[in-house]
Amino acid sequence: MLESPPPVLGLHHFAWRCRNAEETRHFYEDVLGLPLVHLIRLDRVPSTGEFCPYVHLFFEMADGSNIAFFDLGDDTAAEPSPNTPSWVNHIALRLGTLDELETMKQRLVDHGVDVLGITDHHFVRSIYFFDPNGFRVELTVPVAPAETLAAYKHEAHAALRAWNAERRAAASETPAA
């Protein structure tokens, strides 16, 4: 029998490409309130040795995790995937209360950011917006009681098996091209 893997303790950072380091710093630090806590400036990528001058910015959240960005110095943001709807790829950041969610929504609007929501997903309530790089961000507040979350956890594998069975059935009914 295989040993269990070591536990993943949490998120250290999530990294994304940005168009402009200062524009990104302003948005994440001045608008969202995440302090810039580290910047790496290198000419070579440590993991590959590739020559590609960049800065790597880290913005810290209250739990010590970070959202990070790479500015490659060419004023180019990451391109969205052509086969994926714009609402799919995003990062969801947790706030503590619904009042904080309302405050952040108003703060974003006051800074000229288009905000969608507050959307009620029944287990969380969320707002959605795009950062200056076209990256979709969700701010969310958990609202479900512990019993509801425990039921979701208990039912997750069965729900996935049902989804997989439906996909297999649909695929077998589709005529070959």
Image (cartoon, grey):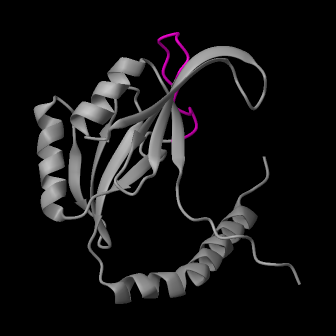
Q: Quadrant of residue 46?
A: top right
Q: Is residue 103 left or right of residue 67?
A: left
Q: Quadrant of residue 174?
A: bottom right
Tell me, yes or no, whether the highlighted magenta stretch contains residue 82.
Answer: yes
Q: Residue furthest right?
A: 1
Q: Position of residue 38 (x, y in %)?
A: 46, 33
- Residue at the image position 29 percent from the left and 30 percent from the top: 27
Q: Residue furthest top?
A: 74
- Residue at the image position 25 percent from the left and 40 percent from the top: 33
Q: Quadrant of the N terminus?
A: bottom right
Give the magenta range.
Answer: 71-84
Foreground pick, 14 / 77: 14
Q: Quadrant of residue 125?
A: bottom left
Look at the image and tell me whether residue 132 can be seen: no
- Residue at the image position 48 percent from the left and 36 percent from the top: 68
Tell me, yes or no, whether the highlighted magenta stretch contains residue 123.
Answer: no
Look at the image and tell me whether residue 109 can be seen: yes
Count of marks placed on residues:
0
Foreground pick, 41 / 89: 41
Q: Position of residue 134 (x, y in %)?
A: 40, 29
Foreground pick, 130 / 46: 46
In the image, residue 74 above or below residue 136: above
The secondary structure that most of the magenta stretch takes on is loop
In the image, residue 50 above or below residue 126: above
Q: Is residue 174 left or right of residue 162?
A: right
Q: Position of residue 8 (x, y in %)?
A: 62, 65
Q: Position of residue 42 (x, y in %)?
A: 62, 19
Foreground pick, 165 / 156: 156
